[in-house]
Image: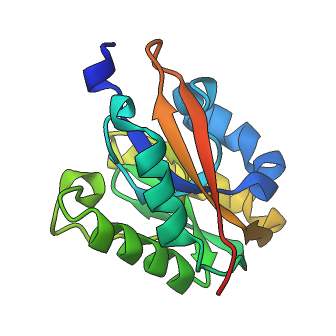
Amino acid sequence: MTDGHRRSALVVAAAEAEPVVDEWRLRYQREAVEHGLPAHLTILFPFVRAAEIDEGLLTKLRRLYAPVRPFTYELTSVASFPDAAWLAPVPAEPFHALVDVARQAFPALAPYGDPEHVVVPHCTIGTDADPEAVEAMVRALREGLGPRLPIRCRAAELVLLAEEADGTWARRAAIPFEGA
């Protein structure tokens, strides 16, 4: 993969969830796990090309997100899109606020490449192009993972992930939420 095609993403890592969800992510999203993507809630993807990450961009991100106060949330229930099973965060509002900051600061970078996309905060556990397979995944997750919910998490930073030349993802920077 050439430098010009490597992607990046702004996420909130859900480290506290990983011991609970990793076996399910390995079952339903093995490639993402093996490529280094942590359990997370996406704030903006795709973000800039990985080659565009520099100190100026990191300074801008620190300035934008420093006023955010760290917050707690819980991953409370299994839900789905036609192509993904995921855990819903409660409250969702802090994630909407983080997305809004990114949208205002980077208006040319639409969430998931669609300017009309309505962001639903979520922590993806599995994906499949077949909606029936996703329905089966949701049933299995509700039965097997459901009793372990809610998972209490703390968001204290925004993480900038970047795709490497070999297709893996690496943590390029952590932008702390310092609170106003």
In the rendered image, the vertical position of residue 22 relative to residue 45, given as above or below: above
Q: Left or right: 160 with respect to 38?
A: left
Image quadrant occupied by the N terminus: top left
Q: How is the image coloured?
A: rainbow
Q: Residue at x 58, y 80 (%)?
A: 67
Q: Return the x and y of residue 46 as percentages of the image width and height.
A: 32, 46
Q: Residue at x 66, y 70 (%)?
A: 177
Residue nearest the observer in this picture, 135 or 93: 93
Q: Quadrant of residue 142?
A: bottom right
Q: Return the x and y of residue 141 as percentages of the image width and height.
A: 65, 55
In the rendered image, the vertical position of residue 99 relative to residue 50, given as above or below: below
Image quadrant occupied by the C terminus: bottom right
Q: Return the x and y of residue 77 as percentages of the image width and height.
A: 63, 72
In the rendered picture of this protein, how many numbered marks are placed on residues? 0
Q: Left or right: 117 with respect to 72?
A: left
Q: Return the x and y of residue 70 as percentages of the image width and height.
A: 71, 76
Q: Residue at x 26, y 23 (%)?
A: 4
Q: Left or right: 13 with respect to 99?
A: right
In the rendered image, the vertical position of residue 104 relative to residue 57, given as above or below: below
Q: Is residue 122 at least partly visible in the picture? A: no
Q: Residue at x 42, y 48 (%)?
A: 56
Q: Is residue 69 at least partly visible in the picture? A: yes
Q: Quadrant of residue 87?
A: bottom right
Residue nearest the observer in this picture, 6 or 31: 6
In the rendered image, the vertical position of residue 137 relative to residue 71, given as above or below: above
Q: Left or right: 136 with respect to 132?
A: right
